[in-house]
Image (cartoon, rainbow, N blue to C red):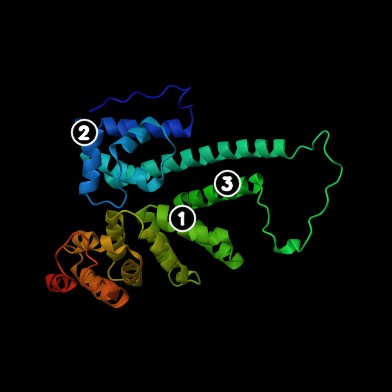
Amino acid sequence: MARLRVPNEDQLPSGPYRDFVIALQDLYHAAPGYSFERISRLIKEADLPDSVSHERIRQILSGHRGFPRWLTVETLVRTLAKISSPTRDPDHEAERFRTLWSRAEEHLGSVKSESSEALEAHNERPLENGPESVEPPKGDVSKERPIVTRGQKSLEQNQKIEIRKAAIMMAVDELVATIESLREEDSSSFYYLIEAIGKYRSIPKLVLLLKALYGRDTEPYVGIALEHACTRPIFEVASLLDLIKKDGKSPQASSLLHVIALHMPPGWHATFLEEIYETNREEARELIQLIIVYRPDHHHTWIANSKQTIWEYLRWTE
């Protein structure tokens, strides 16, 4: 096992990103005897949707070669939590690192924004010896594409960071009110908020939000959030189903199964079924029936890396 060194402040300045990297290194060192190569193999053997190469693991833990996306970080964190000594709760660690990652991303976005604004201000200075007037363009300028300045791009990036932060951290009641308010505007911010909720909000908090949204005017958008939730690691989607069902069969559980049948990549279906069939056999059978209806093109071949046909799975769930 390689003992990682904390980068000096010239390489990685103090701030949220440095705090994130140091916390990640601490988690890695809590798993003695596991090399980067071995951790990468464990991730692949677990059939997680976001495989991570040993070199990428090294880069993430060292704070090198670009800020990692959350799906990659969560996959790595959950794997490290399971192999730590003593073992740590993967859900708790994922929640902890989601906060650290969000703060780091927000900080890096604001730094990038300040640099972009400085460059924009420099580029917009008048030329000392330039022409006093510019000839207007010929033709129908209304058909030309609008020019998006660096300042506008920076503003949009900052808005996305704030929206994602709200999706992750905001209390249920406050978030429901925000969703209802943005829905009236039918803006891009509203749809990005729904997407961010599905992709990034912790599973327990996502379930509470979904329950709060049912029976409201915003209920139709629950399906959009669930669609994006299906891009998360398979064990998270299985956990989402378990928590939704905790209080008994609910419309949210049925909605989730429909979304999984429609939108989950076909190669993931077999792994998802294996994840849920012991505790959710009724849902496993319902999901197979939905796949037959919604994905007839995957009649016999939708199960990746398996010789079992869909009909064998139907018998298996009886």
Kindly identify the amino acid type of the residue bearing the numbered disc 2.
Tyr
Assess whether mark 2 and mark 3 are in contact (beta carbons under 8 angstroms): no
Residue 90 makes an appearance in the image: yes
Position of 182 compared to 144: left or right?
A: left
Query: Residue at horizontal 33%, vertical 63%?
Result: 264
Whether residue 88 is visible here, answered yes or no, is no
Given the image, on which type of amino acid does mark 3 rest? Asn
Looking at the rendering, which quadrant does residue 254 occupy? bottom left
Circle 2 sits on which residue? 34
- For the residue carrying disc 2, how many other residues have a C-alpha within 10 Å: few (<14), some (14-19), or many (20+)? some
Residue at the image point whose x is 46% and y is 25% from the top:
11
Q: Determine whether 77 is above or below 240 in the image.
A: above
Judging by the rendered image, the residue that carries numbered circle 1 is 196
Relative depth, front residue between 89 and 65: 65
Tell me which amino acid carries mark 1.
Ala
Which of disc 2 and disc 3 is earlier in sequence? 2
Residue 145, position in %: x, y? 67, 58
